[in-house]
Image (spheres, grey):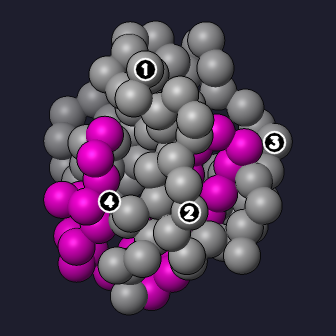
Amino acid sequence: MTYIVTDNCIKCKYTDCVEVCPVDCFYEGENMLVIHPDECIDCGVCEPECPADAIRPDTEPNLEPWLELNTKYALIWPVITQQRDPDPDAEKHDGEEGKLAKYFSEKPGEGD
């Protein structure tokens, strides 16, 4: 099992989770984070830290596309280990449906 970041992170990008990760397996895109599934040690400390409830165990049903997305972008985006401010409109976009199709950006974030 591993933990993965799902669509509710898009346009929210809270980084509370990266501060608690003991293995620094979060990677930053322009408007979301991903977890490198091969680096994640399945400790689960990040899941309750996410204000947007965007971190899920990959054992939940129908998350295969998100596992693939996390794997792909963790290989090309920079690592992030320090908490930053969320996206300015995070509260507005928290819980919004269809964020992958509307807003997802393949561009990398700043990283550390």
Left-right relation of 30 to 59:
right
Q: Secondary structure at mark 4?
A: strand
Quarter assignment of residue 106: top right
x%, y% of residue 8? 39, 32
On-image quarter of the C terminus = bottom right
Please state if 106 lies on the left or on the right of 23 as rendered.
right
Label 4 Cα crowd, 10 Å radius (few <14 / some 14-19 / many 20+): many
Q: Which residues are magenta?
A: 23-52
Q: Quadrant of residue 54?
A: top left
Residue 34 in view, yes or no:
no
Measure how far apart labels 3 and 2 are at the Cα level: 18 Å
Image mark for residue 92: 1
* Residue type (three-letter) at the residue carrying disc 2: Arg
Say which label, 4 or 2, has the lower sequence index: 4
* Residue at the extreme bottom of the image, as rendered: 22
Determine whether label 3 and label 4 are within 8 Å by CB: no
Q: Looking at the image, tell me whether mark 3 or mark 4 is earlier in sequence order.
A: 4
- Helix, strand or loop status at disc 1: helix
The residue beneath circle 3 is 107
Is residue 43 in view? yes
Determine the residue positioned at 56% across, 62% down.
84
Tag 1 or tag 2, which sits nearer the N-term? 2
Q: Is residue 105 in the magenta section?
A: no
* CA gap, disc 4 and disc 1: 25 Å
Look at the picture and state if 4 lies above or below 35. above
Which label is found at residue 3? Answer: 4
Q: Is residue 37 shown left or right of residue 52?
A: right
Q: Separation of disc 2 and disc 1 at Cα?
A: 18 Å
Which mark, by number, is residue 84? Answer: 2
* Residue type highlighted by circle 1: Lys
